[in-house]
Amino acid sequence: MLAYWAGAVVLGAISGALYLAAFVLPGGVVLASLTQAPLFIAGLTLGLPAALAASATSALVVSAPTGPIGALLHGLVNAVPVLVLVQRALLSRRAADGSLEWYPPGLIFSWLAGLALALLGPGTLGAIGANATVVLTVPF
């Protein structure tokens, strides 16, 4: 049981370190793009509680140098989508013939698109709203 939680904590620390690499290393953006991979590994191999523990650990690692705002941003952009997608990916049920049916991959991608819309939509609408007077007054 200790190895279970230790694995989740280590994967969360790796995720936080990958996220912070963008602030420290010149090529760190490449490493920062891999931030969600350890969280997915924790969730898909150890389960949703481990993904939650890894996400919390990752937020703690990020909050040390960046403060609570950095941890909140990291959690919204990286941890929340991973937790939702891992929860959906681990859903299964028994079919009538006794075989195991997993949650359809197409619906998982639909959730991914919905999460992207939920995270990017308000910012896009805010940017459009700020420029709405310019857009509406320019003749076509």
Image: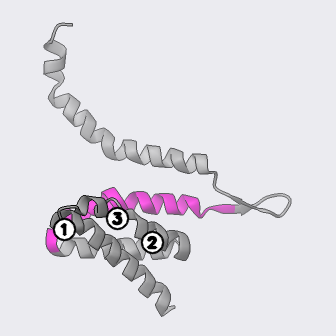
Residue 48 versus residue 126 in the image, above or below? below
Q: Nearer the viewer, mark 2 or mark 3?
A: 3
Q: Find the magenta span and give its range.
A: 65-92
Residue 84 shown left or right of residue 102 in the figure: left
Residue 82 shown left or right of residue 139 in the figure: right
* Image location (x, y in percent) of residue 122: 28, 40
Say which label, 2 or 1, has the lower sequence index.
2
Residue, disc 2: 51
User: Which is more toward the observer, 88 or 20?
Assistant: 20
- Quarter of the rendering containing residue 32: bottom left
Q: What secondary structure prevails in the magenta region?
A: helix
* Image location (x, y in percent) of residue 20: 22, 68
Say which label, 1 or 3, has the lower sequence index.
3
Extreme residue in the top direction: 140
> Marks 2/1: CA distance?
20 Å
Extreme residue in the right direction: 97
Q: Residues within 10 Å of mark 1 (few under 14, many from 20)?
A: some
Amino acid at the residue labelled 1: Pro
Label 3 sits on a secondary structure element that is loop
The residue located at (47%, 76%) in the rendering is: 50
- Quarter of the rendering containing residue 56: bottom left
Residue, disc 3: 35
The residue located at (63%, 55%) in the rendering is: 103
Q: Nearer the viewer, mark 1 or mark 3?
A: 3
Residue 110 shown left or right of residue 121 in the figure: right
Residue 88 shown left or right of residue 10 in the figure: right
> Marks 1/3: CA distance?
18 Å
Label 2 sits on a secondary structure element that is helix
User: Which is more toward the observer, 115 or 16?
Assistant: 16
Q: Within the magenta stretch, is there residue 74? A: yes
Query: Pointers 1 and 3 in contact (CB under 8 A)?
Result: no
Say which label, 2 or 3, has the lower sequence index.
3
